[in-house]
Image (cartoon, rainbow, N blue to C red):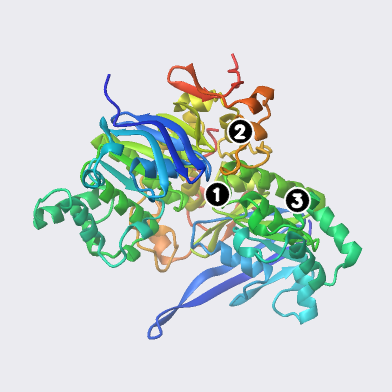
Amino acid sequence: MKTPFVRVSTIRKTFDTGTVFRRHAMTAVNDVSFDILPGETLGLVGESGSGKSTLGRIVVGLTPASSGHVTIGEHRLGALATAERKAVWRQAQMVFQDPHASLDPRMTVHDLLAEPLRNFGIARGAEAAALIAETLDACGLGMRTAPRYPSEFSGGQRQRIGIARALIVRPRFIVADEPVSALDVSVQAQIINLLQDLRAAFGLTFLFISHDLAVVRHIADRVAVMFRGRLVEIGEAAAVYASPLHPYTQLLLRSVPLLDPRAEAERLARRVAEPKDAAPASGGCAFRTRCPHAEPLCAAEEPSLSSRSGGHLVACHFADGQRRHSVQGEAA
Amino acid sequence: MTDPVLSVRDLTVRFGEVAVVDKVGLDVMPGEIVGLVGESGSGKSVTARAVMRLLPRRAAISGSVRLLGEDIGAMSERRLRALRGSVVSMIFQDPMTSFDPVHRIGAQIAEAITVHARPGWRKATKRVGSLLESVGIAPARARAFPHELSGGMRQRAMTAMAVANGPALMIADEPTTALDVTVQDQVMQLMRDLNQSSGTAILLITHNIAVVASLCSRLVVLYAGRVVEDGPTADLLSAPRHPYTTALLRSVPRLDQPATRLVAISGQPPDPANPPSGCMFQPRCERAIARCREAEPPLGAVGAGHHVRCWRPVEVAA
């Protein structure tokens, strides 16, 4: 049994919302735990507002958790002295969705890559130049790009710069939050392939966050599904896509239009109308108001994440009896 | 032979020296759903706005756009305004910015009705209720403000407003792009239902090939402001003839096929201010020959209703 490289334990994050007069707490991430093995890519999927980006920022240490903790390598985030925190940040880097917003427009590509090297005291002078050249090359950018500014590049090239900046400190772990969502289809494939190549070349561990189920299927070894701040299903990618156990995962997979006309016709024939304008559930299972299989038990008791076969975990009272509904993927 | 609802010929839109849309032609027949596919900068949204005459004054438009046989270019602003929202309506990517935030959605839909007809307040209110119901929103929600609705509900309310006057054509510009996948599925079903129940023709503009493939009977593929391929959806998906269409289909991550390494298209779309010589796709094309750099190919027929702009179209496997 391999030791996990990243351990996320009972993470909870609440934000204060409302007005000055009526404050209330909104729970963005609720009691989430998972491990990522060294060299593994865990895909994290969910709809907007599911808490997946907040969780990603907590895992990399950009946002503090309200409770729970994250361990990366031997270090536990949060309880660190400054020097130690730097050591963790060198190991764990983040790639953002919009490289236009995350790269300082007044810095050249060279400066953007030299800055982390200087901040972490990794290299300077000729040594730094060699690292920059090597990293640019690994990311499919030539040395010619070094003196130019981010604004001179297209979206795909800019994302390569964002990736190079994360990679320059030679991290062991990268959290990528929707790294290809803002890109055109033809460029998206380039970046997905690049991330896969870098993972192999540098032995990287990935947390890959995306709303796009097809992209995650291409890149992830395991998949975690979030709904309203909770982890509802996690397992080997092949197992989750072939036979999703949670009704929400089943709904997600059923909702994706397919390119193959025959598979799409079958998908449409199987389409079940979702109850519209379903009010968010309070108490019990958060998905129950949208769930076609909800029973009184679902309102009374919140299901906990429990193990099925082969490390496949699901938070549903009736997941075992619903296998027959998980038709997505079998037709393919 | 019936006449098309929308007929676009040689549509060219220039901003200064730069042609963003170059000699685009397409037809939408009554009751048909046609997909206009392209990446950002391919000119698909500009084409849609040129059809509605919603472009800023500095845009120089040439070519012809005929709506139910009537030339839009020759119309007065008053006539245009009468057509927009009645004969042809449009829905946009972000319904939050297309609704007025300070008015209730019911009142806004009622306004869309009363601008074009005078049914009286009570009748209009009743119609708003049934329109909302037809898109799966409780009529009582007519009193909600746009911000009180979820993204999916806003897009459905927007669709209700777009079909309020029974348009012959609805232009939908990336209607599902900002939505979650489960909500996207609902909006797609809504468009399918509206098309079938009222016979409204739809011009659907999106970068998502799977969405257009599912909804449209015909596809028009744009690249760098030009139509590079058009034809029946089934033909384009099973036997694409343009190298760009072929490469695009191979580069899409798919749920319905085993996960293999994606075949990426190298490089990026051309800068419209600095286009390559000859064919627009030639710098990224694996099949390019000298001729492709010398002259731009014309759009030629390769099958029934199937056209491709290429000197060396991809062969169809026998």
Q: Residue at x 34, y 65 (%)?
A: B147
Q: CA distance from mark 1 to mark 2?
A: 27 Å
Residue, disc 1: A212
Q: Residue furthest right?
A: A126
**At which x and y percent is residue B186?**
38, 47
**At which x and y percent is residue B272?**
56, 42
Q: Residue furthest bottom?
A: A21
Which amino acid type is marked by label 1? Asp
Label 1 or label 2, whichever lies nearer to me, is 2
Residue, disc 2: B281
Q: Residue at x 68, y 67 (%)?
A: A60
Circles 1 and 2 in contact, beta carbons < 8 Å = no
Tell me the crowding category of disc 2: few under 14, some 14 to 19, or many 20 or more residues within 10 angstroms, Cα based: many
Which amino acid type is marked by label 3? Cys
Frontmost residue, A46 versus B277: B277
Q: Residue furthest top?
A: B318
- Asked whether, in this view, residue A56 is left or right of residue B200, the answer is right
Q: Residue at x 31, y 41 (%)?
A: B170
Tell me the crowding category of disc 3: few under 14, some 14 to 19, or many 20 or more residues within 10 angstroms, Cα based: many
Label 1: which secondary element: loop
Q: Residue at x 65, y 37 (%)?
A: B265
Frontmost residue, A168 versus B39: B39
Compared with A195, B33 (above or below) is above
Any part of residue A313 in sight? no
Which amino acid type is marked by label 2? Phe
Tell me the crowding category of disc 1: few under 14, some 14 to 19, or many 20 or more residues within 10 angstroms, Cα based: many
Residue, disc 3: A139
Any part of residue A85 in sight? yes
